[in-house]
Amino acid sequence: MTREFQGYNTSSAANRHTRDRKCQGIPTSELNRKGPDIGLITVFPPEEDAFFAISAFKPHPLHPFVDLLGRRFLVGKINGKKIIYVRCGIGMVNAAAATQQMLDFFDITGIVHFGIAGNVNNSMSIGDVTIPKQFAHTGIWDWLNPNAKLNANNNIGQLDIESYNVPKGHGSNLLGHIVYNSEPFFSETGEPNSAQPLLWAPISEHWLKLAANLEDLSLEQSVNSTLFLERKPKLVVGLKGSTANIFVDNAAYRDFLFQAFKVSSVDMESSAVVMLGQNGIDIFGSLAATNAAKAVITFLQHL
């Protein structure tokens, strides 16, 4: 179980024509006229609670929130920097929708997703924070007929279900094989309706360089006076992460992801999201969320 947050630089010119739409009687252009904001996104209440418990976020004195299409976007500042915050909800569809709403209605210079993530790298431990350099969408698979032969071209990720039979190597398995299929990616720099296969989505290099200044950050080690970690958590920049609408609480699949994609964390929203076993989140979930929030707030000081 690790903590994870990602930074995505964005274009502040995206869909400006929609930003004058009135929300709760407040034109969003009024909120945007003093320059761009930094977007912050968490996923579920424990992450949000930990973020606000640090008390770094100061609400806008006149317009502390805007309700848009079922979500409440909070408006304020952290260390003098203008912030738009929203809790998106679990899943990639929710994450994409909340991110698009934020870009459509506000003047956003960059977005940080943060929260609790699952750990698939044995060099990482509970309480650690990871800031990945790139992400793979590991939820797109071709499930083959059990008698189908594996294509040598699908050499990124091939999962042979039969290899996990117990006892190992005993008999055949009707689940057969699944092979990874890269996501088709449409870009404003590419030709219209001409998608390119995408395996790794990179994070802003500039933000990663700034994040490297956080590696000496002192993170929380204890939940309370009787529950604490045996070693001090660390912050690591530059590993790889994976995202899929799959809650991973399975050691065999975790090991497969690490071996096939060399990822260190897994989440469900291509940002830092809950992806850990029930016991782990019950015991150390609050510490996980606190360390993620602490890392994000410190990172904002370097922007």
Image: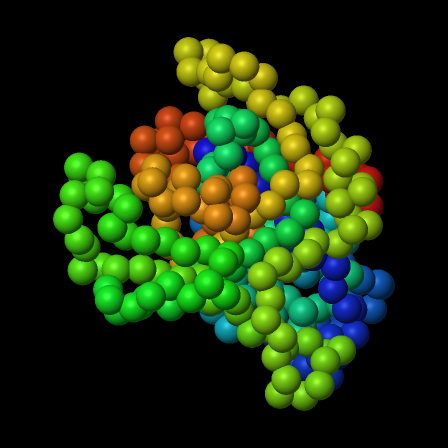
Examine the image and state in which quarter residue 199 appears: bottom right
Q: Position of residue 31 (x, y in %)?
A: 75, 66
- Please state the horizontal and vertical placement of residue 186, each as a whole percent of the image: 63, 77
x, y percentage for residue 183? Answer: 53, 69
Classify residue 36 by image quadrant. Answer: bottom right
The residue located at (71%, 26%) in the rendering is 217
Q: Quadrant of residue 57?
A: top right
Decide: is 44 above or below 229.
below
Q: Is residue 235 left or right of residue 147?
A: right
Q: As drawn, is 73 to the left or to the right of 227?
A: right
How many numbered dots are placed on residues in this image? 0
- Up-down: is 142 above or below 130? below
Which of 32 and 166 lies nearest the eye of the viewer? 166
**Which residue is pictured at 68% across the width and 76% down the height?**
187
Residue 247, given in percent of the width and then of the height, sits at 37, 49
Residue 295, above or below 153: above
Q: Is residue 218 left or right of residue 118?
A: right
Q: Which is more toward the observer, 61 or 286?
A: 286
Residue 42 visible (yes or no): no
Up-down: is 235 above or below 90? above
Residue in view at x 22 percent, y 42 percent: 169
Q: Nearer the viewer, residue 125 or 17?
A: 125
